[in-house]
Image (cartoon, rainbow, N blue to C red):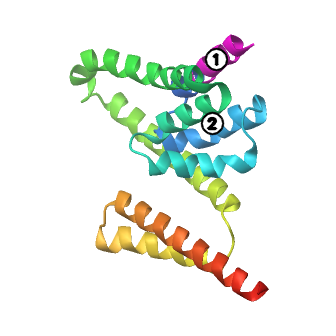
């Protein structure tokens, strides 16, 4: 049974890696559909946590998500299988393209193909944004943190990793204050 699940993780993430263009954020809706809707490995309420963990840890979000889902689903070997599955297509494609790209990068058809791919990726990113926004907490604290994070990155060009760490610390402090405030009212 476990070997079948490990093989399923490998094949699922191989498909995700092979047919999703645009990087990790573009993969989020596909990962959600495959692991929640189709296979039922993770509950929908856990997707936002997986994305938050995958984004907060070093490395690409698609690989971190695959590793996390694989581990949650089938332990160490599930993590290995899912990670290898999501990485293999990109590695293979990049390896093959590296032999030919310099010869073809100036062709108009190739330039237009990349323009089309970028437009498609943008739509996938917007879809991921909307999906994540629907699942985020809806309170004034969340709106303020989101707005300030956006402004800090856009206006002050602060490294996104520092903003993520700052948001995590802010969230923990907020939760501790809310918890202690709630306990004080009970006494």
**Residue 12 magenta-highlighted:** yes
Horizontal and vertical percent for residue 135? 69, 58
Measured along the vertical axis of the image, is residue 57 above or below residue 94?
Answer: below
Residue drawn where x is 28% and y is 27% of the image: 107
Horizontal and vertical percent for residue 76? 55, 24
Residue 58 in view (yes/no) = yes
Q: Nearer the viewer, residue 177 or 11?
A: 177
Q: Secondary structure at mark 1?
A: helix
Picture mark count: 2
107 relative to 181 in the view: left or right:
left
Horizontal and vertical percent for residue 7? 64, 14
Horizontal and vertical percent for residue 17? 52, 26
Residue extending farthest front = 187
Label 2 with label 1: CB-CB less than 8 Å: no
Please, what is the dominant secondary structure of the magenta stretch?
helix
Residue drawn where x is 37% and y is 67% of the image: 153
- Give the image quarter of residue 150: bottom left
Quarter holding the C terminus? Answer: bottom right
Q: Secondary structure at mark 2?
A: helix
Kindly report the distance in space between the C-alpha atoms of the residues bearing marks 2 and 1.
16 Å
Residue 146 in view (yes/no) = no
Q: Nearer the viewer, residue 132 or 10?
A: 10
Marker disc for residue 92: none
Q: Residues within 10 Å of mark 1 (few under 14, many from 20)?
A: many
Q: Residues within 10 Å of mark 2 (few under 14, many from 20)?
A: many
**Residue 4 magenta-highlighted:** yes
- Residue occupied by mark 2: 31
Q: Which range of residues does the magenta coloring cover?
A: 1-13
- Residue occupied by mark 1: 6
Quarter holding the N terminus? Answer: top right
């Amino acid at each position: 049974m476990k070997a079948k699940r490990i093989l399923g993780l490998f094949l699922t993430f191989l498909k995700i890696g092979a047919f999703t263009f645009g990087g990790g954020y573009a993969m989020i809706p596909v990962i959600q559909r495959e692991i929640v809707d189709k296979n039922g490995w993770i509950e929908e309420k856990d997707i936002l946590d997986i994305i938050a963990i995958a984004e907060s840890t070093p490395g690409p979000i698609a690989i971190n998500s695959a590793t996390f889902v694989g581990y949650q689903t089938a332990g160490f070997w599930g993590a290995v299988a899912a990670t290898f599955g999501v990485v293999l297509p990109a590695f293979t494609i990049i390896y093959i393209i590296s032999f030919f790209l310099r010869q073809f990068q100036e062709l108009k058809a190739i330039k237009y193909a990349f323009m089309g791919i970028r437009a498609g990726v943008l739509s996938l990113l917007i879809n991921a944004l909307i999906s994540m926004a629907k699942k985020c907490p809806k309170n004034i604290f969340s709106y303020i943190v989101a707005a300030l994070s956006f402004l800090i990155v856009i206006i002050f060009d602060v490294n996104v990793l520092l903003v993520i760490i700052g948001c995590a610390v802010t969230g923990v402090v907020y939760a501790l204050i809310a918890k202690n405030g709630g306990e004080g009212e009970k006494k």
